[in-house]
Image (cartoon, rainbow, N blue to C red):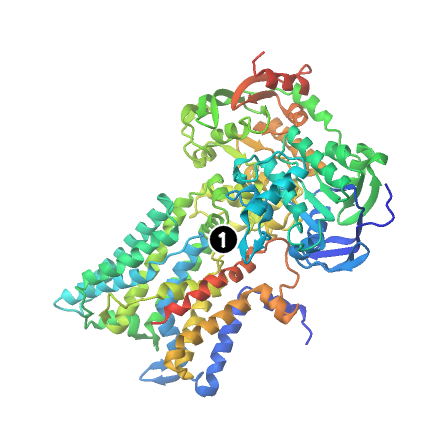
Amino acid sequence: MTTTPRLRALTQHHLFWPVAVLVVLLLINVPFTPDFFSIKMTDGHLYGSLVSIVLFGSPLILVAVGMTLVIATGGIDLSVGAVVAITGALTCSYISDQSDQGALAGVFLAMGIGLVAAVVCGLWNGFLVARMGIQPIIATLIIMVAGRGVAQLITDGQIITINSEPYKLIGGGYWLTLPFSIFVVAAVVAVTVALTRKTALGLLVESVGGNAEASRLVGIRSRRIKIMCYVFCALCAGIAGLMISSNTSAADGNNAGLWIELDAILAVVIGGTSLLGGRFSIGGTVVGALVIQTLTTTIYTIGVPTQTNLVFKAAVVIVVCLLQSPKFRAKVFGNKFGPGKRTKGGDTTSTAPADAAPTTTAAPKMEVS
Amino acid sequence: MAEPRPVLEMTGIVKEFPGVRALSGVDFRLFPGEIHALMGENGAGKSTLIKVLTGVYPLDGGTIALDGQPVRIDSPFQAQQAGISTVYQEVNLCPNLSVAENIFIGREPTRYGRIQWSRMRKEAAELVDRLGLDIDVTAPLSSYPLAVQQLVAIVRSVGTGDSDGAGAGTKVLVLDEPTSSLDRDEVLELFRLMRQLRDEGVAILFVSHFLDQIYEICDRMTVLRNGTLVGEHLVSELDQVGLIHLMIGKEMDQLEGLHEQQLHADVGEPLVKADGLGRQGGISPFDLEIKKGEVVGLAGLLGSGRTELARLLFGADQPDSGKVSIDGKQVSMSAPNDAIAAGVAFCSENRKTEGLVPDLTVRENIILALQASRGWTRPIPVAQRDELVAKYIKALDIRPANPEARVGQLSGGNQQKVLLARWLITQPKLLILDEPTRGIDVGAKAEIQKLVVSLSEEGMSVLYIAAELEEVLRLSHTIGVLRDRKLVAQLANGPEITPTRILETIASGEHQ
């Protein structure tokens, strides 16, 4: 097989490997579920495996998109899972106190309260990281641990169940034949892309993550930028929290969003954003999150024995990370898919995911609950 | 000098990067027991050739032979195994470890899997001693100045293979700009070590932008231009004028004209006034006035407080005494933002760590300062941005002239120009240049100095810091002399001010 320049250009595109992995994972399902790609219309709703993957992957996409910006600044946010739980707990407990759980005003107010709590968590993280100079992994560990406790305090250690039609829409309802959460995700992704690429925010974030001291000396208010990123990340986690609690019509302080931070970090890395900070790709993150959700779905459809779930998932993740590594590709495939005309010097954008791989391959072992 | 067989022979070396042919068919040879200079402008291919030799870049064409045997060098480790050691401009050691640990890191003497600490210290001490250095190998590396750390890096590289017979001894030692941050005494110590190694039969490849140093220490030189070999010459047979001619391919512009021009230029009203500005451990309180269109040069030895003074004027460090006013208005200087808003720009001497964002493109790096001052909500309109960037790439002759290129890929001189472009685009009133010509080639040096003169003519004030006194004298209207973190004198430039006079002032430490 000869590699034409066009094919080479295609394989060099930063989204090529994440998308390729996604397609392969989807195709693996076909022998096990022949109608995997079919989408049926039932009761005016679209059903099918692809729709479910996006539906169940929605919270992860949201959390991962927020995580991308934090990671691009050179930080990390471990608290997103706890923020998911806090938001869900606050919102559901407020709704459950209402006499009319279906009242729109009450539901909106409840969601507002939940999201404000998420923003407060983000402010706290950002304050610790940017103002106090605490390492991000430690700073966000605080809410990661304490946040679950707070969520359980809010719910009195119970699982609060609610019965609210309007609230059910966000995570479990349909609109224009599609799950409503898909529209929420699309809106958040669109807003994020616009916010980072139509303004200068993306450039400034990449600058802060790429060289913090140079950014300070060039007059970028990097502390403000970092705080914004942590707040945005927490807000995304909050929306995911609404979605998860809405989907189950319940707030579970213990288990809602458990380990989602690790899946989210993994999605960001699979999407090609370096854990070292700097260049980021929202599109890559969305694909990365879909890869992880597809993997989870695949594990169920092809009938991997439950006890080997984690090992199977870890194995796939290792393969994905290896495929992302230009060094590995050059070794295994030769120059065909290798780095090709590699640009000069430490090509950190492309090598960094490879370097980051060992840290993140450790993560998935703990993450499936 | 002509030994029968070179220890290293590189033939027809080709290296390509996307859109650039960095080396096209370069031949290079190195004889045992010689110090060989690799000369050329920025972007001529010096660094690329070294990186190909040391296994950092894979080869796109050509062959490398060591002792007559063809070798494949795919990684820095293989290069070291083959006997090629490299010491870079930036010291790549661990400052928190001891000197002995740094020398033996990765090849510690072991017995039953345990490190033999005492043997390691003893061997390190012997090695240091043999090379005639006075270094306590048990002290942490960070307790020594940069120059000594550099010497330790050399000791480490020639010590490769000494223990447990792993790998061959060093046959080829590559020194890439080792002198750029050393003062005179330190350079002499380095040269003494280099001569000793040469006499032991090591072939040394030396890269430096200081022509005087080349003529002092080297036996032979190879000149590159635009990725091709221009020629190989004995140092004794090629004078400096001839060398510069070969390097830039045209007669160099006379920089002396600049000096005349500066001496006769008029400067305007006061722009910047610092009163008793100082910082504990940085620089003693000083008074300084910079007028509009004036170039103030700072002269002083390394560590005399030149950079510290500049950083205070930019708010990069917070002063703990004194105040600054710009255009008659007092500026708080609590952060770079304040200084930038008042029209001050600062090109740090550390381009890589404090200047550029290597992952971003040339365009993004150029607009960064302007964008930062506009805030994130007001991006520079695309058309205006592209026009500005294109204008400055052209005006400063940044190569490659591709705004999409990653800045990390550019050569040192071009990186410096990107940094200059970044600040010029903000149209500052005061431009602080800290060692803008360090580590860049003759051609780019001349361009930057000419730029400074023309900026000052247009009314921009410049605070100019350079290690080379001639450079400071050539460009400055006023010269601030620093010694031991004090501004000891401010001299108006004139015919009677010479490098000797400045050195006397530094030595006596007094105003005259």
What residue is rendered at 78% in x and 49% in y?
B228
Q: Which element is circle 1 on? A: loop
Q: Is residue A226 above or below residue A317?
A: above
User: What kind of residue is marked 1?
Assistant: Gly
Q: Position of residue A179 (x, y in %)?
A: 34, 74
Work out whether residue B439 or residue B157 is closer to the camera in this orientation and state it.
B157
- Residue B40 as seen in the image, left or right of residue B431: right
Please, is residue A327 above or below residue B378 in the view? below
For the N terminus of chain B, the quadrant is top right
Residue A206 percent location from the top left of the image:
48, 51
Left or right of A299: which side holds B93? Answer: right
Picture coordinates of residue B246 (x, y %)? Answer: 81, 40
Q: Quadrant of residue B465?
A: top right
> Image height check: is B54 above or below B351?
below
Image coordinates for residue A244, horizontal then vertical, percent = 29, 69
* As drawn, A328 above or below B351: below
Residue marked by disc 1: A278
Please give the chain letter of the residue carrying mark 1.
Answer: A
The quarter holding residue B472 reads top right
